[in-house]
Image (spheres, rainbow, N blue to C red):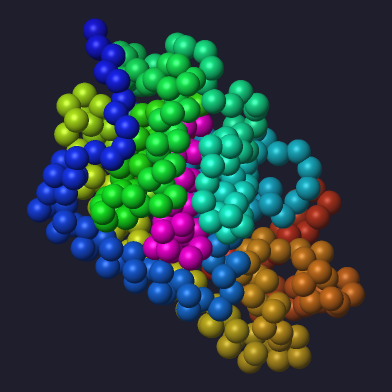
Amino acid sequence: MNSIKKLEKLPPKRDKVETVEILRQLSKSSRVLGELKGIAKTIPNQAMLINAVVLQEAKDSSEIENIITTQDELYKALATKGKQPLQVKEVINYRRAIFTGFELIKKQGFLRIKDIETIQKTIVENNAGIRAMAGTVLKNDKTGEIVYTPPQEKDEILNLLSNLLEHFNINQTDLSPLINLAVLHYQFESIHPFYDGNGRTGRILNILYLIINELLDIPILYLSSYINENKSDYYRLLNQVNNTGKWDEYILYMLKAVEETSQKTIEKINNIKEQLSKTIVFVQEKEPKIYRKELIELLFEQPYSKIEFVVDRLKVERKAASRYLKRLEGIGILKSERIGRETIYVNKELIEILKH
Ligand SMILES: Nc1ncnc2c1ncn2[C@@H]1O[C@H](COP(=O)(O)OP(=O)(O)OP(=O)(O)O)[C@@H](O)[C@H]1O
Ligand SMILES: [Mg+2]
């Protein structure tokens, strides 16, 4: 039997979360994250970068919940109207939830409990809200054994969430913001305020926290791919904090996740930048008459593009827009695909970069 231990309020004792090994890893993680923040600024078109990275994250994060979709399906869904399969819809919802959260913190600079509810609601598309009925327990996926019982009373949940937000919006302790990130993530998952979507909501809170604390300016760092690849450790370490109050291994795990995913994101940004400049030079050379910087940037913002997008962006007639896209296909920059009654133009090389 798993005895029910009360979840403690933040902050934890400093010596529990700041070992020598953690501080050593912290300096590596902070350095790479700082580099990522700097490199992101050098991308000329921020919307392009955000779109690409956020969609990939929506896909990765949903996969933790076993919602498997292909990149192709997702871009198609974004470029076309009409009914989407449930799996695709869930990923698109997650993407929307990231943007909703980002807009909220841009506007107000902090989060409230009701904002967290808004984010979760966008993901799960129901109005259940914060748990009001007892009975939620966390089980081991394989054995079905109960591994953790989160707080059951709504009042306690709300109390713990207020306490969490005090540390989320302003770093009250003198803990380094990245150590605090790990602590906050554990705490949110352990409060487990919702019936469902706690993992996905918590992963969105991570990026919002980084932005509130000015470690990043735009939502481009996600730990989901790392968590996916190291899932059993992730669950094991959350459990370890629950059961023993030992934080160090879990904090190290999260700091490594920050280091590794920052590194990967830097590489991706460099690849996108390189591909963008290559494309610009190529089009200028092969189709100088249709070359427009905004046209090329559009193809990077919307790797699945269509006539309508070009009309909107460049303020040209449909005929001209169609001719641009066909010419670009002619020189191999795009590839057209019929989807239902629409023709979509795919920036294949970019899609390849975004996949990895
Ligand atoms: N022992 C534990 N202690 C605290 N939190 C845990 C523990 N085990 C799992 N969790 C958290 O619970 C989350 C799953 O909760 P829930 O099913 O509500 O979220 P989800 O978004 O639907 O799922 P997923 O995170 O799998 O995508 C995990 O992602 C993890 O963060
Ligand atoms: Mg779930």
- Residue at (46%, 71%) from the top-left corner? 40
- Residue at (84%, 76%) from the top-left corner? 315
Is 144 rendered above or below residue 307? above
Q: Say which of 190 and 83 sits in front.
A: 190
Residue 103 visible here: yes
Residue 68 visible here: no
Q: Quadrant of residue 157?
A: top left
Is 348 rendered above or below residue 119? below
Q: Say which of 170 and 311 sits in front.
A: 170
Rendered location of residue 86, percent (x, y) = 64, 33
Rendered location of residue 87, percent (x, y) = 60, 35
Q: Residue furthest left?
A: 20
Q: Say which of 289 and 296 sits in front.
A: 296
Q: Is residue 164 magenta?
A: no
Rendered location of residue 233, percent (x, y) = 25, 36
Rendered location of residue 191, percent (x, y) = 40, 28
Q: Is residue 205 magenta?
A: yes
Q: Say which of 139 and 52 sits in front.
A: 139
Q: Quadrant of residue 301?
A: bottom right
- Residue at (65%, 70%) from the top-left corner? 299
Q: What's drawn in magenta, residue-wise?
A: 196-222
Q: Quadrant of ligand 1?
A: top left
Is 242 rendered above or below residue 143? below
Q: Quadrant of the C terminus?
A: bottom left
Q: Residue furthest top?
A: 1
